[in-house]
């Protein structure tokens, strides 16, 4: 299959689209006049947006253990409270 064929989709195209559909579109449909100053500012804003979003997701992923530890403590306290109320 020829890579210039429109029906070809590479894994990097899929990754680019998953990261940002706009990025994928503009990679395959660049503006005929080239990038403008306004598009450069939008590109930087988009890059900063993705950087912030990915950093927030990374923080949430890193705190997964703390979340489950909190759930476990809550369950132990709930069971202990029920047993304390039901004691003879």
Image (cartoon, rainbow, N blue to C red):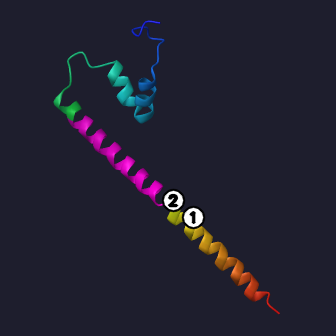
Height in image: 33 above or below 36? above
Q: Secondary structure at mark 2?
A: helix
Horizontally, residue 86 falls left or right of residue 50, namely right
Instruction: From the top left corner, tell me how far across and down residue 38 is, in percent.
Output: 20, 32
Mark 1 is surrounded, within 10 Å at the Cα level, by few (under 14), some (14 to 19) or many (20 or more) other residues, namely few
Q: Residue furthest bottom?
A: 88
Rendered image: mark on residue 64: 2
Q: Which residues are magenta?
A: 41-63
Instruction: From the top left corner, tell me how far across and down residue 83 is, in percent.
Output: 75, 84
Q: Main secondary structure of the magenta part?
A: helix
Instruction: From the top left corner, tell me how far across and down residue 11 is, in percent.
Output: 46, 24
- Which residue occupies 18% across, 27% down? 36
- Which residue occupies 79% across, 87% down? 86
Instruction: From the top left corner, tell me how far across and down residue 60 is, in percent.
Output: 45, 56
Q: Is residue 30 magenta?
A: no
Q: Is residue 49 magenta?
A: yes
Disc 1 from disc 2: Cα separation: 6 Å
- Which residue occupies 43% across, 29% down? 17
Q: Secondary structure at mark 1?
A: helix
Are the residues flagged by discs 1 and 2 in contact, CB closer than 8 Å? yes
Q: Quadrant of the C terminus?
A: bottom right
Frontmost residue, 62 versus 46 = 62
Q: Which residue lies under the disc numbered 1?
A: 68
- Which residue occupies 33% across, 24% down? 26
């Amino acid at each position: 299959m020829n890579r210039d064929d429109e029906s070809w989709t590479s894994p990097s195209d899929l990754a680019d689209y998953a990261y940002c559909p706009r990025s994928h579109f503009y990679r395959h449909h660049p503006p005929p006049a080239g990038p403008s100053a306004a598009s450069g500012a939008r590109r930087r804003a988009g890059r900063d947006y993705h950087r912030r979003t990915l950093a927030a997701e990374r923080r949430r992923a890193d705190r997964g253990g703390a979340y489950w530890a909190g759930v476990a403590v809550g369950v132990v306290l709930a069971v202990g409270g029920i047993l304390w109320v039901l004691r003879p």
